[in-house]
């Protein structure tokens, strides 16, 4: 995984790199071996969760801080439970009702948190690069839980995990990502992650919501919904209501969007599976009949989220092979 | 008169056995230069020149943000002009997007008084085209020009209304001062954070497309042609913009253009660092754009290098990229950056860079053209081309340190600056 020096290397030519500390800030921090190791760890952890006592002692005495500047249901609960299942102490800080409301800068909030010596800070922030600022200001390992439209690396890892569990492979898989790529950190992380494991990616969506030049990330682009036909996995992105506000006008209406790019039963062929990072707008980007059908992996994605985030926390703090031993001593 | 600084006697000194380059006069050779009471009194051939040293006409920067009045925590006239002196400049023009805006005789008059008290080099002030930079009504340009405004600009903002732009062009015939334009069609640039292209697509930043600049340049060149008035386009960033200016010049439009050192040296690839000192408006663009800017500078389409020196408080840049203000400092590093990244690798000729930093901008804004000639006032910069130094936060005269060059090792150093006959910087 990435070291603090990573992003600074390009700026401070000739400077000695700062002491290494591992983070997960972006998929580009990982190589294929890292991904294989993390997915393997997640599989091992998943087996342990079949036991009656689901808690592992691995991170006992460690502190994981969840610093969330944006609303979140599944990511926050998933990180929180992941840390607890590994016996870590957790602390959640939300922007609402904290000193962030009083105009405190991200750097100052990070410095304040650093005084508690957290082992991991999980951060979600509306702005690109916020996790880098936290990584620079503290001694914690930092996990990016979503920074603006940039990256959401644990989502991409849990999506890879889900695909491999369902389809048995990643190499050579063809994934169509459908919808609002422009505003989607999920899409950016997933495109990079799929390229890393040798899968093929096609982006499908209205030209106004597919950013110019994105094909250089190593994917194909089409505005025809028929483009999902060849894919093994149809990955549906959330169509955000706020993109339709007056002045934004990325598409003329949600009605037209649903008609042109909505994923409906008739647009799928047998053998395809459907994924969605949530929360869904049923009837807009995804037909409820698809969301609730057997081809949907959406609840599997949530379940994968827990084990993959446990694997990430474990990998950052403990490293090495997972020792599956229930934490009986923990009350 | 449009340049102001404290009264004082000229210095007397001689600079012996130095390579003298004056691109305007076509001089490049070893000379002894003698200055008495601020006037060059003798320019005599010397047997040999000291290694690495070059004496050239001092630089002129028509695009500087001095932040006075309003943000004296970021820069003052004293600190900004000291930075300019250290960068080899003998004259600078300050932008009017201050708080309050330089849109009235009262504000301009106060600035001129300040410059007469504390400027380290001759300093001029641009007035705004529209009151409060709101793009609604013209400022009292005739009065401002009479008081000493060096030109007019709404820099930081485009003149959105074509109608107001036409009136400003018509009225510039009364003031005789240049209109300098920040070109940005805001319904295209929107909330753009960086150049629109593969890098913004990969990083997730809202894109500021190059065409948002060039469509406004096309519009304003058409208006300038119609009104038969000259026009200056600030900080070109895109190849389409260079093409638009070149085409207008070929049609006979009196349009001039400038480019910043950072647009000549960097591309949007560097934004991958997420360093907020890579965030400027207009944004850094692609390698094709950079090459077009270099070609425009070489063939004279772009007659002038301007720093767009934009100091910002450290805490305002120490935030995520999208929260940070646009702009970087540049006065103290302009020549050395161009020399390090473009002249030494052979992309630009030294003489060309010296001309585009001195005579080029001076001519556009009707300022005295620095010349190395007997009888002229001394406006000189002495440069050690062999020196190397590292840009460090504690080394700036500017009150701000938001330089894109922090931590970089640079080649060449400004050893001495003489402005209007006085030694204003000696390393």
Image (spheres, rainbow, N blue to C red):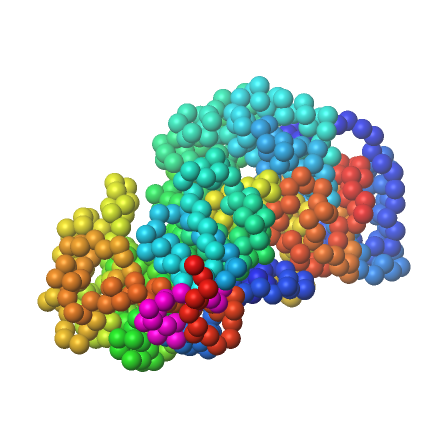
Image spot of residue B275 (x, y percent):
54, 53
Image spot of residue B165 (x, y percent):
41, 33
Left or right: where B414 falls relative to A242: right
Q: Nearer the viewer, residue B119 or B372?
A: B119
Confirm whether residue B173 shows in the render. no
Q: Main secondary structure of the magenta part?
A: loop
* Residue drawn at (61%, 46%) of the image: B402
Image spot of residue B125 (x, y percent):
60, 31
* Residue drawn at (77%, 61%) of the image: B386
Q: Nearer the viewer, residue B291 or B208?
A: B208
Residue A51 magenta-drawn? yes
Q: Which residues are magenta?
A: A44-59
Quadrant holding the N terminus of chain B: top right
Residue A98 magenta-drawn? no
* Residue drawn at (26%, 42%) of the image: A245
Q: Which residue sits furthest left? A: A266
């Amino acid at each position: 995984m990435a070291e603090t020096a990573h992003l600074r290397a390009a700026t401070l030519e000739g400077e000695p790199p700062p002491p290494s500390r591992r983070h997960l800030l972006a998929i580009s921090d990982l190589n294929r071996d890292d991904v294989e190791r993390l997915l393997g760890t997640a599989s091992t952890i998943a087996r342990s969760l079949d036991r009656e006592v689901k808690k592992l002692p691995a991170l006992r005495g460690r502190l994981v801080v969840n610093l969330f500047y944006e609303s979140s249901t599944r990511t926050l609960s998933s990180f929180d439970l992941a840390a607890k299942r590994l016996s870590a102490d957790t602390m959640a800080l939300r922007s609402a009702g904290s000193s962030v409301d009083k105009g405190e800068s991200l750097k100052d909030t990070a410095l304040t948190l650093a005084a508690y010596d957290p082992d991991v800070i999980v951060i979600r922030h509306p702005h690109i690069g916020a996790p880098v600022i936290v990584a620079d200001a503290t001694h914690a390992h930092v996990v990016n839980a979503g920074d603006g439209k940039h990256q959401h690396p644990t989502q991409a890892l849990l999506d890879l995990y889900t695909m491999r569990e369902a389809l048995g492979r990643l190499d050579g898989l063809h994934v169509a990502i459908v919808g609002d790529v422009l505003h989607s950190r999920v899409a950016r992380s997933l495109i990079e992650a799929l390229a890393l494991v040798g899968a093929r990616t096609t982006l499908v969506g209205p030209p106004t919501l597919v950013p110019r030049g994105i094909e250089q990330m190593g994917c194909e682009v089409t505005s025809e919904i028929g483009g999902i036909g060849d894919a093994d996995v149809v990955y549906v992105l959330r169509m955000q209501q706020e993109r339709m506000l007056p002045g934004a006008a990325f598409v003329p209406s949600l009605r037209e969007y649903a008609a042109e790019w909505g994923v409906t039963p008739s647009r799928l062929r047998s053998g395809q599976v459907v994924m969605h990072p949530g929360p869904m707008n049923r009837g807009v980007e995804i037909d409820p009949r698809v969301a609730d059908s057997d081809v949907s992996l959406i609840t599997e994605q949530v379940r994968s989220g827990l084990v993959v985030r446990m694997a990430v926390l474990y990998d950052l703090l403990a490293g090495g092979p997972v020792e599956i031993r229930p934490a009986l001593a923990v009350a | 008169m449009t340049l102001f600084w404290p009264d004082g006697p000229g210095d007397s000194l001689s600079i012996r056995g130095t390579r003298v380059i004056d691109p305007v006069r076509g001089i490049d050779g070893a000379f002894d230069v003698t200055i008495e009471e601020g006037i060059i009194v003798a320019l005599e051939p010397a047997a040999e020149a000291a290694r690495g040293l070059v004496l050239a006409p001092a630089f002129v920067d028509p695009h500087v943000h001095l932040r006075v009045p309003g943000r004296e925590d970021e820069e003052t006239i004293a600190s900004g002009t000291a930075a300019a002196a250290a960068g080899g400049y003998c004259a600078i023009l300050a932008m009017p997007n201050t708080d309050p805006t330089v849109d009235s005789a009262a504000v301009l008059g106060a600035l001129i008084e300040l410059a007469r008290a504390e400027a380290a080099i001759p300093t001029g002030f641009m007035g705004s085209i529209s009151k409060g930079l709101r793009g609604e009504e013209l400022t009292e340009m005739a009065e401002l020009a009479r008081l000493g405004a060096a030109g007019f600009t709404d820099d930081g903002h485009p003149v959105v209304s074509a109608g107001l732009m036409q009136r400003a062009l018509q009225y510039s015939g009364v003031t005789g001062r240049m209109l300098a334009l920040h070109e940005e069609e805001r319904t295209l640039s929107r909330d753009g954070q960086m150049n629109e292209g593969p890098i913004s697509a990969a990083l997730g930043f809202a894109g500021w497309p190059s065409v948002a600049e060039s469509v406004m340049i096309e519009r304003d060149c058409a208006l300038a042609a119609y009104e038969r008035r000259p026009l200056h386009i600030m900080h070109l960033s895109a190849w389409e913009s260079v093409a638009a200016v070149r085409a207008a010049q070929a049609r006979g439009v009196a349009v001039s253009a400038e480019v910043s050192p950072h647009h000549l040296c960097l591309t949007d690839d560097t934004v991958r660092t997420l360093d907020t000192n890579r965030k400027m408006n207009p944004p850094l663009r692609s390698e094709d754009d950079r090459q077009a800017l270099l070609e425009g500078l070489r063939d004279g389409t772009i007659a002038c290098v301007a720093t767009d020196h934009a100091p910002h408080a450290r805490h305002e840049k120490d935030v995520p990229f999208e929260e940070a203000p646009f702009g970087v400092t540049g006065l103290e590093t302009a020549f050395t950056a161009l020399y390090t990244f473009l002249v030494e690798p052979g992309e630009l000729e030294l003489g060309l860079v010296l001309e585009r930093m001195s005579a080029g901008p001076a001519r556009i804004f009707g300022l005295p053209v620095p010349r190395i000639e007997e009888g002229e006032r001394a406006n000189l910069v002495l440069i050690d081309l062999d020196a190397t130094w590292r840009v460090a936060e504690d080394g700036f005269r500017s009150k701000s340190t938001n330089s894109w060059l922090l931590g970089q090792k640079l080649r060449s150093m400004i050893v001495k600056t003489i402005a209007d006959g006085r030694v204003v910087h000696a390393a």
